[in-house]
Image (cartoon, grey):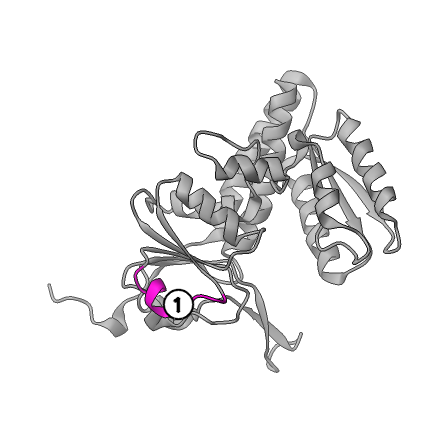
Amino acid sequence: MALATQSEHKATIIDGKAIAQTIRSEIAHEVRNLSQKFGKVPGLAVVIVGNRKDSQSYVNMKRKACAEVGIKSIDIDLPEQASEDELINKVHELNANPDVHGILVQLPLPKHINEERILSEISIEKDVDGFHPLNIGKLAMKGREPLFQPCTPKGCLELLTRSGISVKGKKAVVVGRSNIVGLPVSLLLLKADATVTTVHSRTSDPERIIRDADIVIAAAGQATMIKGDWIKPGAAVIDVGTNAVDDPSKKSGYRLVGDVDFNEACKVAGWITPVPGGVGPMTVAMLLKNTLDGAKRVIQ
């Protein structure tokens, strides 16, 4: 049989929405079991300070997802001008509440509040975002396991696993080094025995490095920065980027694109996640999974 020409090649689309839905069903089943066996359900406290539109919509999405799987959502809405001490008192209150198994403080926080101080006040047993310095520290150490892995990085690896893509011994390139995605996803890949390279804003010749990768995790926050010809044929591409670009044909006036030029990359990659509908739904599914795991440690 003749080999397919370049133009005929089409990457396998990794459907994050469908995979996340499967995970949510698994979680709902486990939550029902906990409820029947022990008369208790997992509880997630979602704390939002101020009224940023994007934060509000993320929080509503998380609260709705909780309801769907039977996790009790405890809603804490503080005004924009709430002081750092008020927020810390609220966190301490939630730390002490036995019905709360996960605490999520929606970032970014208003400028006058020290994010690092707040995150380190969350009980490590309830740190479902996985951002407590102790959890990140354990993630970075060989032979140690954090109580929780950060949701988006965990979702990226889950997409690879559930798509049958093995990580062990593979060359993985992570584009971006943020505390929320780039850094922890590179640590997770290392834990899974990949050979990991981080590409960032000061990297010279990123194209050459990315072209060598079996697995690319794009988390730079730069619209379509990674071109199709930067991708090694057959590579797995996980696109974490969510960038709004002007599109007058859309009612909202914009559309969302990833950090990878999707149409071009599809012609080369073996697997690729779309934006939207790839990593996004997985982040919320992993938050629910972390909350369930935190509850199981306490209830069972």
In the picture, measured across the screen, residue 246 lies left or right of residue 198, that is: right
- Can residue 27 be seen here? The reply is yes
Q: Is residue 198 left or right of residue 250?
A: left
Query: Which residue lies under the disc numbered 1?
Result: 206
Residue 158 visible? The answer is no
Where residue 219 appears, x then y in whole percent?
A: 50, 59
Q: Quadrant of residue 99?
A: top right
Q: Residues within 10 Å of mark 1 (few under 14, many from 20)?
A: some
Where 297 sits versus 23, above or below?
A: above
* Residue at 85% over, 37% down: 89
Q: Which stretch is magenta? A: 201-212
Question: Does residue 91 lie above or below 32 as drawn?
Answer: below
Left or right: 115 with respect to 289? right
Q: Nearer the viewer, residue 2 or 296?
A: 296
In front of the other: 284 or 117 = 117
Q: Nearer the viewer, residue 238 or 225?
A: 225
The percent coordinates of residue 53 (x first, y second) are: 75, 62
Residue depicted at x 82% and y 32%: 93
User: What amino acid type is highlighted by mark number 1?
Assistant: Pro
Q: Secondary structure at mark 1?
A: helix
Q: Point out residue 132 in the picture as x, y percentages from the top left corner.
A: 64, 39
On-image quarter of the N terminus: bottom left
**Which residue appears farthest toward the bottom when viewing the image?**
248
Report whether 266 appears left or right of 140. Answer: left
Image quadrant for the C terminus?
top right
Decide whether residue 206 is among the magenta residues: yes
Q: Of 33 and 279, which appears nearest the observer?
A: 279
Residue visible at 60% across and 24% down in the picture: 296
Question: Quadrant location of residue 212?
Answer: bottom left
Q: Is residue 37 covered in magenta?
A: no
